[in-house]
Amino acid sequence: MPAIETICTITAKGQTTVPKSIRQALGVGAGGRIAFRVEDGVVSVRAAERDEPDQALGPFLALLEADMIRRPAQILPLDEAMLTRLNKALDGVTVDPDDPIEGDVSL
């Protein structure tokens, strides 16, 4: 594969958008994960393996679980009005998570 170089801008929050050409070269789409490596002042990016654990997911799920155990009365079903609004907002919307992403995406 030929070398691909694209220049990106980093926001004040330290964020950037992975350019479409890079996402395509890595075979990474929405929800995909990438790994950064810094070695001898050079940064490399690769597609992360799917079985690599998400470092934030476990602690977040543990927090949710503890909160649900501590305050079960706060777990409420959606009321009819909210359900109606959601259904109206999603009417005619179809989503295929396997569809390619067009344009730049900020992850």
Image (tube, rainbow, N blue to C red):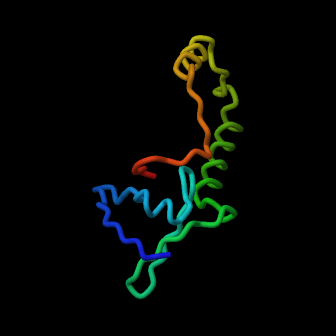
Q: Is residue 6 left or right of residue 50?
A: left
Please give the name of the residue rendered at 45% of the width and 84% of the height, measured from the top-left corner. Answer: 39
Residue 6 vs residue 79, the one in the foreground: 6
Viewed as shown, does residue 38 lie left or right of 81? left
- The vertical placement of 55 against 79, above or below, is below
Q: Where in the figure is residue 58, as x and y percent of width and height?
A: 65, 55
Q: Position of residue 23 (x, y in %)?
A: 48, 60
Name which quarter of the figure residue 12 lies in.
bottom left
> Looking at the picture, how far across and down is residue 41, in whole percent?
38, 84
> In this picture, is 97 found above or below 2?
above
Name the residue furthest front. 2
Residue at x 64%, y 27% (from the top left corner): 74
Q: Residue at x 66, y 23 (%)?
A: 76
Count the marks. 0
Q: Residue at x 34, y 60 (%)?
A: 14
Q: Residue furthest bottom?
A: 40
